[in-house]
Image (cartoon, helix red, strand yellow):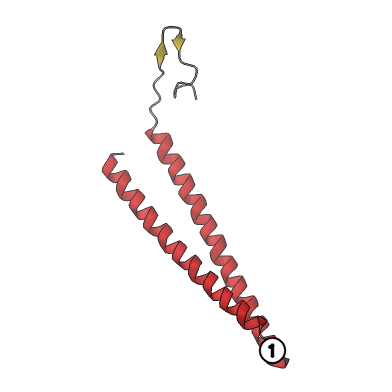
Amino acid sequence: MDTETVSIQLIIIWRFMVEWHKKQLQEIMEAESQVQEASCKITGDSGLRATMKLEMECLKWEKCFVDWINAQKSFVKFLNRWLIKSITRENEETRNGIAHFSPGRV
């Protein structure tokens, strides 16, 4: 894999991560507004509706957060595969033979 291809792939991945961070921030801001709304003194049906709405927003946020975590895991797996492909597997020779921490021995 050449450097230009890797650079393009990393740019794509970073743009994807930026979008996830924007979504995460938006969900956090929405959740905060729901908490503020719920903390107001609300009685009767309106209190129940506000609680249910807050619960639904929390569930939505949880799903987005899980999706974000899964995206992070995928990104780490991608980086790991890329690094493994990038490491040359040639044994390094020293005066005493093969180096103990040579990439070929790792």
Camera-side residue of 33 and 99: 33
| Amino acid type for the residue under numbered disc 1 | Ile
The answer to whether residue 12 is left or right of residue 60 is left
Q: Quadrant of residue 49?
A: bottom right
Q: Residue 2 location, x and y as percent?
A: 28, 39
Relative height, residue 29 to residue 75 (above, below)? below
Q: Residue 38 location, x and y as percent?
A: 65, 82
Relative height, residue 51 to residue 22 (above, below)? below
Q: Quadrant of residue 59?
A: bottom right
- Identify which residue is drawn at 43% across, 57% down: 17
Relative height, residue 76 to residue 52 (above, below)? above
Q: Residue furthest top?
A: 95
Instruction: Label 1, secondary structure: give it.
Output: loop
Relative height, residue 70 to residue 103 (above, below)? below
- Identify which residue is drawn at 59% across, 66% down: 62
**Other residues around mark 1 within 10 Å, as few (<14) / some (14–19) / many (≥20):** some
Name the quarter where the N terminus is drawn: top left
Q: Residue 69 location, x and y as percent?
A: 54, 56
Q: For mark 1, what is the residue? A: 42
Q: How many numbered circles does the render carry?
A: 1
Q: Residue 14 location, x and y as percent?
A: 38, 54
The answer to whether residue 65 is left or right of residue 9 is right
- Identify which residue is drawn at 47% across, 67% down: 23
- Identify which residue is drawn at 39% across, 21% down: 90
Q: Residue furthest right?
A: 44
Q: Quadrant of residue 57?
A: bottom right
